[in-house]
Amino acid sequence: MEWWIWVLAGLVLLGIEVFIPGGFFLAFFGLAALLVGGATAAGIAGQLTAQVLLFIALSIAGILLFRRALVSRFGQGRHGAEVDGLVGTTAEALEDLPVGAAGKVELRGTTWTARNSGGLAIAQGQQCTVERLDGLTLWVRIAAEEFLGDTRGTQEPRASGEPARLSPGAAAE
């Protein structure tokens, strides 16, 4: 196979990698094709069978040796920055969320599925804080500014007239 076909294939693969968020797979095939093209032009790659084997070996070696480092360095910034910014933000409960139960909350104008990970029930209309994100489910707990505390460890939501509820740590006292 002509050397320029390998170079052209390598450039096409590198170009596709730029536009498709594939996690640095095609880049290694593109670089391997460029290296095989250079070796073919220099006359050291041999026949087509040797070129294909060299291409496969270089691609696999690149993926095994360098992909993890590249994804950890560059991959997270490309895909997860906006979603990771949700942790610590405040949402509003669209329905009652008992402890451990799932329901709906509104965050930044969008309705999300949420699970109450705190020790207190969240009433409809109360503010809650996003603790983590699991797929498209927000794990929330009642927002800190929503309770009033007393010296015995009881906490009462400010937004509703419900009776005071014990905090998770107060039950052990």
Image (cartoon, rainbow, N blue to C red):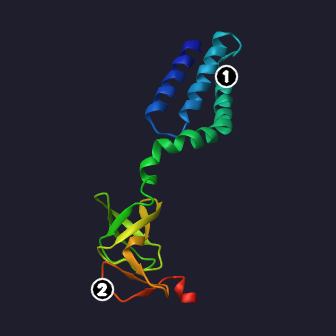
Residue neighbourhood size for the residue with mark 1, other residues' Cα within 10 Å, grouped as few (<14), some (14–19), many (≥20): few
Structural distance between the alpha carbons of marks 2 and 1: 79 Å
Residue 24 coordinates in the image, percent (x, y): 55, 36
Circle number at residue 25? none
Left or right of 48 in this view: 20: left
Mark 2 / mark 1, whichever is N-terminal: 1
133 over 67 or under it: above or below = below
- Looking at the figure, which quarter contains the N terminus? top right
Residue 41 coordinates in the image, percent (x, y): 63, 10
Residue 75 coordinates in the image, percent (x, y): 53, 42
Amino acid type, callout 2: Gly
In the rendered image, is residue 2 in sight? Answer: no
Q: Which residue is mark 1?
A: 49
Nearer to us in this view, 62 or 107: 107
Q: Badges 2 and 1: C-beta atoms under 8 Å apart?
A: no
Q: State the SS at label 1.
A: helix
What is the total number of numbered labels drawn onto the structure image? 2
Residue 17 coordinates in the image, percent (x, y): 49, 32
Which residue occupies 32% across, 68% down?
A: 92
Amino acid type, callout 1: Thr
In the rendered image, is residue 141 in sight? Answer: yes
Q: State the SS at label 2.
A: loop
Which residue occupies 67% across, 22% down?
A: 49
Which residue occupies 65% across, 33% down?
A: 62
- Residue 164 image-quadrant placement: bottom left
Circle number at residue 161? 2
136 over 155 or under it: above or below = above
Residue at the outermost top position: 42
- Looking at the figure, which quarter contains the C terminus? bottom right
Is label 2 or label 1 in front? 2
- Residue 112 image-quadrant placement: bottom left
- Residue 103 image-quadrant placement: bottom left
